[in-house]
Amino acid sequence: MSSSLPYHHQGSRHVNAPGGRHHRLMRAGESGIYTLSHGGRQLRLRPLVFWLVLGVLATMTAWTVTTVSYFAFREDVLTRLITRQAEMEFGYEDRIAELRSQVDRISSRQLLDQEQYEQQLEQILRRQSALESRANALSGLSDVTSSIRQPPGPG
């Protein structure tokens, strides 16, 4: 029966994946090449590469589990991390409060400058209106003085 199957189906394993999909890991006959097949696509790996990938994945998994368990069971590490995070948060909040106070000072200074500017503008407008009224009064005087006859001069 095994002779009727093509060589790449001999010794194949089906692996169930999420969503009802099937992955097939096959070891091709005597050549020693591993074939990963999914959705009609195939990836062929040599044994050295296949075992190297599996070893790297196992090492990464062991490293992750070790790191997580270290952080989970070492209370002083967690305490230092939480304390550092809280210090950073308070530092940022202090900096934000300082910047807000600077913005408030600048805006109040700007408001004072604007009020002083408006007061100076008002004084200038009052002076201008006083000068205009004086100019009108003087032009009225020139009309009056032109209507008065001047005495004849020596001559």
Image: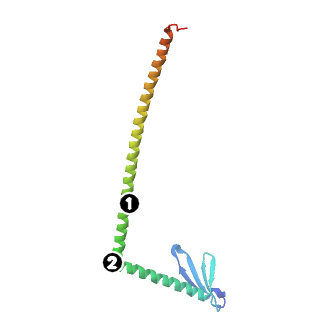
Quick check: 147 above or below 9? above
In depth, the one of 13 and 138 nearer the eye is 138
Q: Name the residue that disc number 1 marks.
A: 95
Where residue 154 sits in the image (x, y, percent)? 53, 8
Which residue is depicted at the point 46% across and 19% down?
138
Q: Looking at the rendering, which quadrant does residue 129 occupy?
A: top left
Residue nearest the viewer, comparing 46 with 132: 132
Q: Who comes first in sequence, dot 2 or dot 1?
A: 2
Q: Residues within 10 Å of mark 2 (few under 14, many from 20)?
A: few
Can you say which quadrant of the picture contains the N terminus? bottom right
Given contact means CB atoms under 8 Å apart, are the residues at marks 2 and 1 in contact?
Answer: no
The amino acid pointed to by label 2 is Asp
Quadrant showing the C terminus = top right
**Viewed as shown, does residue 97 lie left or right of 45?**
left
Q: What element carries label 1?
A: helix
Quarter where residue 43 is shown: bottom right
Residue 21 location (% of width, % of height): 55, 75
Tell me the residue that label 2 is attached to.
76
136 or 148, nearer to the observer: 148
Q: Report helix, strand or loop for mark 2.
A: helix
Eyeballing the image, is 77 above or below 105? Answer: below
